Each structure stands twice: as structure tokens, then as C-alpha cells.
Image (cartoon, helix red, strand yellow):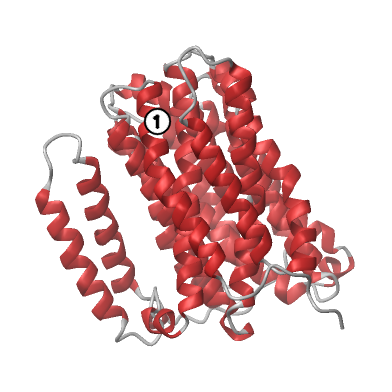
Amino acid sequence: MTQTLRKPWLLVLTIGLGTLLNPLNSSMISVALTRMQHEFALSFADASWLISVFYLASAAAQPVMGKLSDMFGPKRLFLAGLILVAIASTLAPFSPSFPFLLGCRALQAIGSSTLFPSGMSMVRTSISKGQAKALATLSIFSSTSAAFGPSIGGFLIESWDWPSIFFVNFPFIVLSFIMAIFILPKTDQVKIELGRIDFGGILLFIITMIGLILFLLSLESTIRWWALIVFIIAGIIFYKYENKRNEPFIDFDSLKKNSNVSFIYLQFISINLVFYCYFFGFPLFLQQVHHYSEKHTGLIMLALAGFGVIIAPIAGRLIDQYHSKLPLVIGAIFLLIGTALLLSLREQSPLVWLLIIMGVLGISNGFNNISMQTALYEHVKPEETGSASGLFQTSRYIGSILSSSLLGILFSTHLDVQHLHKVAIVCLFFCVLVLILALRLPGKLQLKKQG
């Protein structure tokens, strides 16, 4: 403990090497989907489950792992999470079937979802001076690994095929594990309180989401009406069940009481639905329509990722001066413009035009990510920050799951510019919704009052 306090940067580095695994593995898959489709003879609707199952498992696991961290100690859980990711990353490249690979992706998501809540717990308890800076540094680990995941994955797949996106985890796992043993603070004795974990709510949430995904993916062929019925019935039971829980997975009662926060979650779901349609859709378009290699696809995707990273500090400074509303409105406008410009893309359009469109969309992401989180904290009480942050991440996962379902519907039979336009048309509706929700946020587009 004393050593950690003397050198807090070592604690942050140890945790950061672990926490980057979830966003890295969620984004690298975007460039690998085409190879995996061919490997397992899949339609894109089937392959989209590789995205959905990761986000679904992450959404279910993160709140559970936060509470397990309190019970078993954050260090123990952090090490256990790294072991789970290592097991999944070892088994996945040798998957004998697609369902087995899906299981590995789910295990990978559960293990990597353990690392963030346990890491945050150790930062809060071990670093008092400069805690905000430590949390910001960890945020950089996550956002950077997510942003550059497609580029990293592209270079790896070009050289060593799709299994390499699993093997690349091991340097981070081994280094973080060794450092964790010696650097992370020792944890208290085990205090098992499984009654605090809403297993029933999580199970109902998973059934509800799977019903929705199965229904949406069937819209292009034979519609699975039974899946819609499962979604509706499970959703109603989930809502009623959660209202009776003391510590629910999703606190619907608090959402009803704070409409601003509810609309922030809706806005964040919509932003992620649109952004991840492009984040996962562009690599498929570049590889299957324009026949770019994985390496070149990864390089092109830097236009989307790079602008987001560059703009994030500018958005931070705007937030310091104007609160969150102005950068959110700016981000919404760029998202709307980028989506509208996508409709101008043609088969013969030069690559530079697509890069410009991706740059505009990347700028919107740079504004939206940090501004949405700030908007959330502006509208919740300090004591509600933990639960609000958990539901904020769940909103991100729901948007990502819906984006993969939308791509599964529209890219299921054929992929060309016209199908990309269909994605953009659907996304335009959500872009307008994002702009309306940004404008309705309380506050004026003016400077903060000083002092």
C-alpha cells in the first residue's frame, strides 16, 4: 500500500494495461469480421453476433463485477479478470465452430468487464492527491485503445490472420498481471453478500435483448414473431421485477424521477447506435466493396478515430467555459452533417471524399463522448454517480448492440453503396433525435458565470 501511494503512476499504469482490453477487443473485431465470415461460412447477420454478444455480456457483467469487487476485494477480482481474458484469448483462435467462438467472445467480455470497476475502486481508495488526473489517464487508455483498435487489428490480420487479434492480448495481460501482483494494494477479507446482486434482473435483461436482436435480424427474411413476443413479455416482467428490487440492475424508479438523466441515456444510446454503424460498417464496406486489404482498411479508419482523439481536448476546454450543452449541440450537428454527406458517396467517389466524411463523423465523436459524460454528472447527485455511471455504460452497450442489428438487417444479403445509403437514411432519423435532445438539455449556450 505504501509503495502504491509513493508511486501512484505505477498503480495507474497497471490498471490501465488491464482496462484497455475491453475497448480494444470490442473494436478490433470490426476489421476481422470479413475474414471470420469466410472462415465460418456466415452471413453478416450471423457474424454480427460477434459484436452483439460482446456488448451484451459486457452490459450484464459490469454492474455485477462492481459489487463482486466490493465482496472479494478489487485486487483479487482484477487478477481473476485477467485470467478469464487469457483463457478466452487462448481458446478463441482454435474455435472448432462459430457457437464456440461466440462463447469465447462472451467470456472475453466478462473477464475484461471485471477490470474497469475493480480498477476504479483501487484508484478511489489508494490515490487521494491527483485522483481526477489518474481517472482521466485511465479514460485515455480506454478511449485510445478503442479508437485505434481497427488500425491495430488491420495490421495484425494482414500479417497473421484473424486469430492474431486474440493473441495480441497476451503482452498486456502478462505485464498487467505481474505488475498487479506486486503493485496493487492488498484487499480486505472476503465479505459475500450475493443478495446484493440482481441475478434475476440481469437474466431478464439478457432475455429481453436477445428477443429484440433475434426479431430485428429476421426483418429481412422470415420474420420471427415469436422473438417479438419474447421481447415484449420479458421486457414487461423485467420492468415489474426491477421495481420490486432494493438494488435493481436498472433503477426505473429513479429514471422516472429524473427525466433529464433519462433523456441523456436515450441520447447516448442514439449516438452510439449511429457511430457504431459506421465504426463497424466502414471496414466491411472498404473490404467487401472496394477490396482494400485489412492493413489499408485499418489505416483508412484512422480518419474516423484520429479526429475524435484530436477533438476531445478541445471539447474539454469548451466544457470548462460553456458547460456540456454547447459541445453536445456542436457534436450533434457534425454527426448530422457527416451522415447527410454519406448520402453523396458514389461507387466512383474518390477515397479522399470518404476520408472527409469520416473526419466529420470523427469530430462529432470527439465532442459527444466527453460532453455526454459531463452532462450526466451535471444532472445527478454526487451520491448517485456510481449507479448513474453504470447505467451510462449500459446505454453505450445497448446502442452498440442495436447498431450491429441494424447492420445485420441491411448488410445481410448484399453490400454496396446503396446499402450503405440505407444505413445512413436510418441513422439520419437518430441524428435528428440526438440534435433535438441536445437542444432540450437545460441551460443556455453561454459562458459559465465566474466565481
Q: Is residue 68 visible?
A: yes
Residue 172 in the image, given as x and y percentages of width and height: 66, 42
- Quadrant containing the N terminus in the rendered view: bottom right
- Taking the spot 69% from the left edge, 67% from the top edge, the residue there is 445
Q: Is residue 102 visible?
A: no
Depth check: 75 or 403 in front?
A: 403
436 to 444, vertically: above or below: above
Q: How many marks?
A: 1
Residue 44 in the image, given as x and y percentages of width and height: 32, 30
Depth check: 292 or 201 in front?
A: 292
291 to 377, vertically: above or below: above
Depth check: 105 or 435 in front?
A: 435
Judged from the image, the secondary structure of the residue bearing numbered disc 1 is: helix
253 to 298, vertically: above or below: below
Quarter where residue 424 is shown: top left
- Taking the spot 20% from the left edge, 74% from the top edge, the residue there is 237
- Taking the spot 11% from the left edge, 37% from the top edge, the residue there is 222
Crowd class of label 1 (few under 14; some 14 to 19; many from 20; radius 10 Å): some
Label 1 sits on what residue type?
A: His
- Look at mark 1 in the image and give the residue it sits on: 421
Q: Is residue 132 left or right of residue 242?
A: right
- Taking the spot 74% from the left edge, 69% from the top edge, the residue there is 446
Q: Is residue 386 left or right of residue 426?
A: right
Residue 187 in the image, given as x and y percentages of width and height: 65, 74
438 to 292, vertically: above or below: below
Residue 129 in the image, given as x and y percentages of width and height: 86, 74
- Quadrant containing the C terminus in the rendered view: bottom right
Depth check: 227 or 119 in front?
A: 227
